[in-house]
Image (spheres, grey):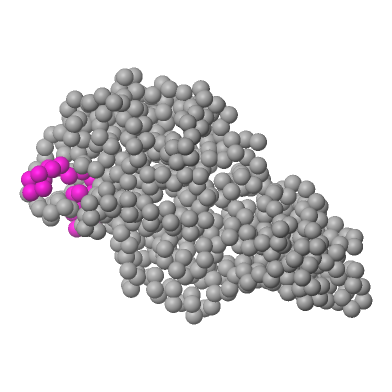
Amino acid sequence: MDRILITSAIPYINGIKHLGNLVGSQLPSDLFARYMRLRGHEVMFICATDEHGTPAEIAAKDAGKDVATYCQEMYHVQKELAERFHLSFDHFGRSSSQRNHALTQYFAGRLEENGYITEVIEKQIYSKADQRYLPDRYVRGECPSCGYANARGDQCENCTKQLDPTDLINPYSAISGSTDLEIRKTKHLYLRQSLFRKKLEEWIDSKNDWPILTTSIAKKWLFDDAGLQDRGITRDLDWGIPVRKGTEPWPGMEQKVFYVWFDAPIEYIAATAEWADTNNLTDEAWERWWRTDKGAEDVRYIQFMGKDNVPFHTLSFPVTIMGSNDPWKLVDYIKSFNFLNYDGGQFSTSLGRGIFMDQALDILPADYWRWWLLSHAPEHSDSEFTWENFMESINNDLANVLGNFVSRVTQFSRKHFGQTIPLNHGWTELELNTIKRLKTNLEEYENCLEQIEIRKAAQILRRIWSYGNEYIQEAAPWVKLKSDQERASTIMNFSLNLINFYGIVSEPYIPETAKLMRGIFKSSSSLNWPHDIEHCLKSLDPLILVEMPPILFKKITPAECENWKSQFSGQSNQSHDT
């Protein structure tokens, strides 16, 4: 049994996330965590809300609430939605926690002691009306690249160009709208990333099993025209982790907080400590996952994230870990994802274009969305959600293949053999050949999940489901029932055991449906990975009751598809927080 540490990129607190956010980190990491648990490994699966930075302050202001109250409310909203999507986190934490405060300040102190933090005087926009500096998204103005009139200070939403607030033409305060701005000098702390270029290069080169997407982004940042640059890790904001050297004050930094991208990855560690606190465990319980001097040298650590998060996880966070000179665990594998687009364009929070997590669950249960998103995960290129493709996938994969098999088997068995499982009177070549096919495909399925090849694994799982329909069609128990009752009984015994088998191997993708399939067999089915398929397909006690399940998946009609397409086009859809 291995120990597997899994972290999902932590979502911003500023509103409910859309499905593109979900499939970029949380959902695939949940699939992998579930599979690793099924294989008997000890898993620690961590996520949290990312509660600092200008997005949190602006969202709170727009909601008419103080930022602490807003973050607390949105934490509970995001936690509830994660649970409704059956995301099996061991702990879902908060980057505003006291654990993260203490750890972030600790890391900053260690980095400063080791000479990896320097003070830099930089120019920043100051608003006289607001009597404060305006970082990042607190400045709006005309994009110097495309002329878009309402570009943010960090990025133009129109042309996606990365910006600095001082780049904007005719800038104004996003807080008050004031144009009474001036450039002032202010002092900030910078992490000396440039000193780690060679060490990072060697570390990244040693990861020859990483996805090309991950390594290509990391190396682009290492070797672009300017090379790896030192990065500011403080901001002039009210909300955030106060700048301190461990427990000591930091002279000249009394009114500043740490930059959100400095403290956010540290929350992975802090959230594991929060898990220990919640369960009344000692520090040793979480340190064994994170400190190599406390047992973490035996841990395999995998991170999941969208491609826009890769630079911070391959460069900045590793520099924080390395620069502390403490025995912290570095990531072993980074699974990164491209973007999911929406019906010919991009998801847009501000325009209400696309589907958000709460809206999706108002329409259909979570497993519908889990299946489509995971079977279309943007692993090797951007992928696109269209309602037509969604309808086709749900109807063909879930309703026609899996749902149809479960329905016809359970109905036939109850009608002709009563409430208990029919007896197995001995397998024929048909059962043995079906098992042979299942074995081959289960091995491929396992290999794909081990390699975190999510789309390919989904294709194999669908193929495994399809063998049930092919088997029952060829076995034809409705024919055998007239001439050979024992053979018909064996066919139904095998078919019901197949449903139980599907209820195990489908669990990482559609956990609620998998649980329902296993629940058909009262007091007999267990969630143990089928290492021995022959044994698994004989595992059900023939004396137990067979419960009639509801329809597993209802088909989506073209009329529903067209209605949803119109509803979420951005024309009438009520927008969520940005």
Is 148 one of the magenta-colored residues? Answer: yes
Q: For residue 199, which quarter of the picture?
A: top left
Q: Position of residue 209 (x, y in %)?
A: 57, 37
Left or right: residue 563 versus residue 554 is left
Q: Which residues are magenta?
A: 125-149
Q: Position of residue 359 (x, y in %)?
A: 42, 66
Camera-side residue of 115 and 60: 60
Residue 241 visible? The answer is yes
Where, quadrant-wise, is the N terminus in this rendering?
top right
Q: Residue furthest bottom?
A: 559
Q: Is residue 541 above or below residue 448?
A: below
Q: For residue 246, which quarter of the picture?
A: top left
Residue at the location (40% across, 59% down)? 18
Q: Is residue 10 above or below residue 63?
A: above
Q: Position of residue 534 (x, y in %)?
A: 81, 52
Residue at the location (49% across, 80% down)? 559
Residue at the location (90% across, 69% down)? 486
Is 357 one of the magenta-colored residues? Answer: no
